[in-house]
Amino acid sequence: MSQTQKIMEVSGDTAIEIRKMNKWYGQFHVLRDIDLTVMRGERIVICGPSGSGKSTMIRCINRLEEHQSGDIIVDGTELTNDLKNIDKVRSEVGMVFQHFNLFPHLTILENCTLAPIWVRKIPKKQAEETAMHFLTKVKIPDQAHKYPGQLSGGQQQRVAIARSLCMRPRIMLFDEPTSALDPEMIKEVLDTMIELAEEGMTMLCVTHEMGFAQAVANRVVFMDQGQIVEQNAPKEFFSNPQSERTKLFLSQILGH
Amino acid sequence: MSGTKTGASGPNNTALWLREEMLSPLPPPSREAGVTKWLRQNLLSSPVNTLLTFAGVVIALWMVWTAFPWWWHSVWNANSLAECRAIVAAAGGESGACWAVIKARWHQFIFGFYPPAEYWRPVLTGGLLFAALAPILYWNDRKGAHMVALSGIATLLSLFAISAGGAALTASLVIFAVIWALAIWRPKALIWVTGLFPFVAVWLIWGGSFWTPVSQLLAVAVGALIAWIYLKNTNRLLNDAFALVIALAAAWVAAVVIGYSDAISTDFFGKMRDVTFWQGYLSGSDNILARLFGMLASLVAMVVIAGIWLLLAVMYLASNLLNLNIADLGALFGKADMPAWSSLLSLGAALAFALVFVAARNRATLVGILAGILGGAAALGYLGPILVSALHAALPLTIVTVGSNMIGGFLLALIIGVTAIAASLPLGIMLALGRRSDMWLMKVLSVGFIEFIRGVPLITLLFTASLLLQYFLPPQTNFDLILRVIILAALFSAAYLAEVIRGGLAALPRGQYEAGDSLGLTYWQAQRLIIMPQALKISIPGIVSTFIGLFKDTTLVSFVGLLDPLRGVTNTVRADINWKGIYWEPYIFVGAIFFIICFGMSRYSMYLERKLKTDHR
Amino acid sequence: MAFATSRAEASKGGFRLSMLIYDTRFRAITLQVVALILFLLFIGWLTDNVIRNLDAKGKDINFGFLWVRAGYDIEQTLIPYTNDDNHGRAVIIGLLNTLVVAFFGCILATVVGVIVGVLRLSNNWLISRLMTIYVEIFRNVPLLLWILLVFVVISETMPAPADFKITPAILESRAALAGLEAQAGGNGLWMRIATLKLGSLPFILWLLAFIGITVAAWQFASARFQGAKAALIAAIPALIWVIMALTVFSPSLSGGPAADAQLAEIGATEPAASKFFFDSIAVTNRGTNIPAPLLDRPLGGTEFAGVPVNFSVLAVIAVLIVSLLANRAVVKRAKSIQESTGNRPTTWYISLVILFLPLILLLLALGLHWEVPGFPVNDQGVSTGFNLRGGIQVMHSFTALLIALALYTSAFIAEIVRAGIQAIPRGQSEAAAALGLRPGRTMRLVVLPQALRVIIPPLISQYLNLTKNTSLGIAVSYLDLRGTLGGITLNQTGRELEAMLLMMLIYLTISLIISMGMNAFNAAVKLKER
Ligand SMILES: Nc1ncnc2c1ncn2[C@@H]1O[C@H](COP(=O)(O)OP(=O)(O)O)[C@@H](O)[C@H]1O
Ligand SMILES: [Mg+2]
């Protein structure tokens, strides 16, 4: 896939639009004038030094954090204090966390059907079928009746992805999904994500896996000190970084 | 906007989007700053929160409004409640606190009926307690010296407050100066002060000859010396001699004990026939429940007795099987008239001798410790009185004796609390280890003890101390009620501590145990050096809250006739004709002191947790 | 000693005595055998001492005293008891008294504790501080102090029964007051408004509550509605509050100078003390008088093994059980509907009807009415007699013990609840939120099931503590197990050993039953985990 093809692939309408968004934790200005437009079907990788506000930004997109100025429009719905809008956005947007956050008191299957049953109001049987479908897709259908504690880290993260997919989201957010995993498990999770990308899911992914970025991303967004510093197609981004900060960051993560 | 959207147009700038200059942080928007924001976030963030806030304000205001006049019209100088009320009324108040009662009776709340001329003794003991605690509470910490200095100053001030004599003041000054100097120059040596403290404290509080604690200390020294010589000695011959003496002592003890248990069992079965143990209920009623209950009780009794008997019988059988019928040996212990028992005696004594001899030759630590304890006890029992009377004749250093019945108030609570706390920790650790032991019997005994103690209220145990102990000890044994209460309180909190520590032990990763084993440490070394420090660290909050519970429970001693600050002293005060009808003031006073001590302990445990956590990093 | 070694060696070959101590195979056994011998000897020594001591005192061990006439009265009894009954029955009465305090204490402590614990976690600064103060004060001061304080305060500050009397003078002044209000128009509303004492504490508190309710209502309404509609909705509770305050509460608010003068003119008096809660509960310095339930058409009863059995009570219990079962069926049906269609039918009102209607019908059929305590009155409405009659008198010792136990234990329960909820990582509720679950559902489906596992074991051990602490009732002469068996019975019969052993056995049994329940719970939730 060439650079232009990758960009052309995305359809015309916007999935997420963030305009001049600012956020403070107390006196600390954590996100500064964030402007970001994500097209439907686009895959975006966000990277940047630790503490630069990557997690905070994607958590703002499904309102796990509240922003204080600017607009966030997800799928045509603006995020305000209105509970209905928040519900709508959250059921459209799936999220995968660094530490999986599976519910330890529920089986894998129950983890996957909980939200469809209570939020989407889907009959249990149907929800279970969907769950099995996605569990099969992430290649762990045989673990459905086990508890999260009995699975390896990589398996747990794949369950977390399946759990999100069961809500049939149109957008997926990933917050460093592989950074809590051992090297041999990283691959199985990345493979799942690549598969998802190939099906055309809109994805925002915070990760430092450069191979993954090269393979699937349409765009790489580099953040530092709470602001977006540079955006570019992955090839350009890695081969020809423009800003000094980007260069420094890349030299650090590729250096070792 | 400081970024540029260049698309793919620029020839050398290929970025889709590049920020050219970084934004500097801005302060949050004004409506999100300062007091308004704080109010909005902390008090008015949602309708429920708003309601809660106002409900809180209403309650707080109501409480302050109703209580304030009472505090405001506090009276400090009066001789009776009626006088207080008159003063309040004269000042135009409806009600007022009458703290005069505290002013008049504070010494009883603190000391009970301790002779006022001797108040300096408990005060000095209290000060020394803090000095003795310093090296434990703040080890490896300059704060230890500060604590010594602070407790010295506090002691001197308190001595002034109770207008103690010049001799007491000078003595205290000198003592604290010495300890403080030690804390500054030889902080490690401060632990010796802690070691000396118990002896000094008992002497200071109960009084008597100064030579008593000295002789006790000497006995401890003798015991330690014996153990030390035995354990450090490398001379084979001396070692064997030692082992022989110890093993002979063990054989003698075994023979005496077996002889005694023989006496018990003969006596016992004779008694059991006469005792109306089961006949009692059967004749007492024709109620079916009574019969059942009686049968159950006798069954339990019989099982215990049968256990003892079985054991003796097995030993007896074994000695017969081995065909050892050396009646002469039995004669040595005055049992020649009973051939069967005498062979049992000889076997038991021989076995004890052999086992102890083997262990002693190998210089087992336990044997050393036991030898030390026995030696010390012998020194205390046989040499102590002689030494005391001799020294006393040479130099009579004596302070007035104060009986336990005169000790009361917070002094009593602290004596019981501190002693029981100190005693319960090692006991609790042993019980916790026993409960996790691989040995079935140790486990069963520990579990049984822990569950029994935790299953009954402390009050029943205290009543046991005051009513039942006389049944369980040999006739005519009688010892101090405070001591009995301390023992029961220590056992009580040891059972709770054992559970807390067991939790800490269970939380340790398996790897820690394996690491200990792989380093080649013995069980006790591993426990002492690796397991316990970590397990105790994890259990600190639980341990401290057990201590707090124990300290609060010292108030229950009033039910066995001791003069605790809460019921004992307060009731005495409230029974006084002058102060009849007063209740808030004494209870607030006593409650406040308990609060300060308990709250202080819980804050200290938080400090300790934080400190240990940072130590760990 | 050599013979023992040599024989052993000869018979077992290769065995040496030192192996008993230094061989890992035998070491544990040796130690245990030594410990067993020492333990049994210790028990034997104790038993021997007991026998010899009993001998010396000329006593035996005999539980026959349980069937001897007790001869003392117990003020609070759940089942019939007179001083002609035997000690055994007195013991059972004591045990029941213990269990009653423990039961209500646990319920009260749990309710208060959960509320305080949850509020302590709230992000409301003021409330969380107040709750922290509550917890610290109650758990750092001995329980005995709370028991004594509550007891002394209620028995020394409450009015004497005679203060509840209605005298002719009171009736006259009431009539005059009614006339005055009628004169002022309507029910005297305007007079009340006109005479509000603006600086008084009740008025200020009432005003604060009013502001709070208005602000909260406004926040609530403006989040959901716009403009005039929001304002209107926000005004409703405030309006209700004003009317309520003026009509119901304002007697305490009123009494401005003008009204004071008028009332003084009439010579208005009221009884020195009045009953609470719609004039039904009277707290005197002797005890708390509460209404007693009476039945017009009771079902009768019988006696079984000395215990009276009341068929009406049995019927109520039976109906309750059936209602609960029916309600469970309804919930189950709702669940299966949800599983098949995805939509959960609303069932709370059906549950409400099922749970309460049968009970209400039964009670109506039985003719339930309440006997309210009070002074008997003559036909003019003037009190006669010297004491409150009717209803149930709850002893102050019971009340004090209950309140003190509940408040003291609630502080510990609050900490347990707080720690339990805090033990659940934030990631759990974030993940639930990210899946679109609302906070209420997140709490119910994700946080609580996990928190309960952390909370319940220590909670049960608090129940155990509370039960054991009921023995402190001795401080206020509450006749529980300790007061009867370990108190009066023990002193009367002089059977210290038997009474104490029996008492410990009973406490131990209660404790063991409770901890068995806890172990069962632990085993059940543990199974789910792995
Ligand atoms: N709840 C919070 N309160 C205060 N500061 C926070 C909070 N969460 C994150 N921060 C701060 O915000 C900054 C950005 O955090 P984050 O978005 O997690 O960074 P990243 O994911 O890029 O490593 C960090 O400096 C962090 O310390
Ligand atoms: Mg992050």
Image (tube, helix red, strand yellow):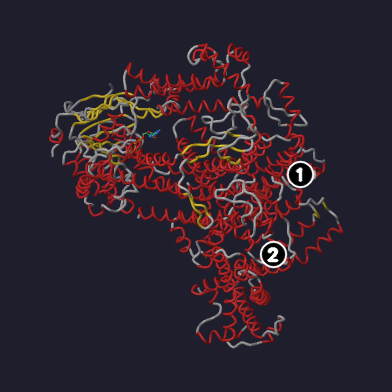
* Chain letter for the residue marked with disc 1 in the picture: B
Could you say whether the residue bearing mark 2 is in a helix, strand or loop? loop
Q: Residue furthest front?
A: C379
Crowding at mark 1 (Cα within 10 Å: few <14, some 14-19, many 20+): many
Q: In the rendered view, does C29 fall on the left or right side of C68? A: left
Q: Name the N-terminal-most of marks 1 and 2.
A: 1
Q: In the rendered view, does C200 fall on the left or right side of B237? A: left
* Chain letter for the residue marked with disc 2 in the picture: B
Residue B12 is situated, as x and y percent measured from the top left of the image, at 19, 28
Quadrant location of residue C342? top left
> Which residue is identified by label 1?
B172
Could you say whether the residue bearing mark 1 is in a helix, strand or loop? helix
Residue B171 is situated, as x and y percent measured from the top left of the image, at 78, 45
Q: Which residue type carries mark 2?
A: Leu
Q: Nearer the viewer, residue B441 or C389?
A: C389
Label 1, label 2: how many angstroms apart (C-alpha)? 41 Å
Question: Which numbered marker is on residue B207?
Answer: none
Residue depicted at 81% across the width and 64% down the height: B386
Q: Is C193 placed above or below A123 here?
A: above
Quadrant location of residue B484? bottom right
Residue depicted at 42% across the width and 20% down the height: C238
Residue C93 is situated, as x and y percent measured from the top left of the image, at 58, 52
- Can residue B421 be seen at all in this image of the molecule? no
In the rendered image, the quadrant that contains the C terminus of chain A is top left
Crowding at mark 2 (Cα within 10 Å: few <14, some 14-19, many 20+): some
In the rendered image, the quadrant that contains the N terminus of chain A is top left
> Which residue is identified by label 2?
B473
Q: Nearer the viewer, residue C189 or C26?
A: C189
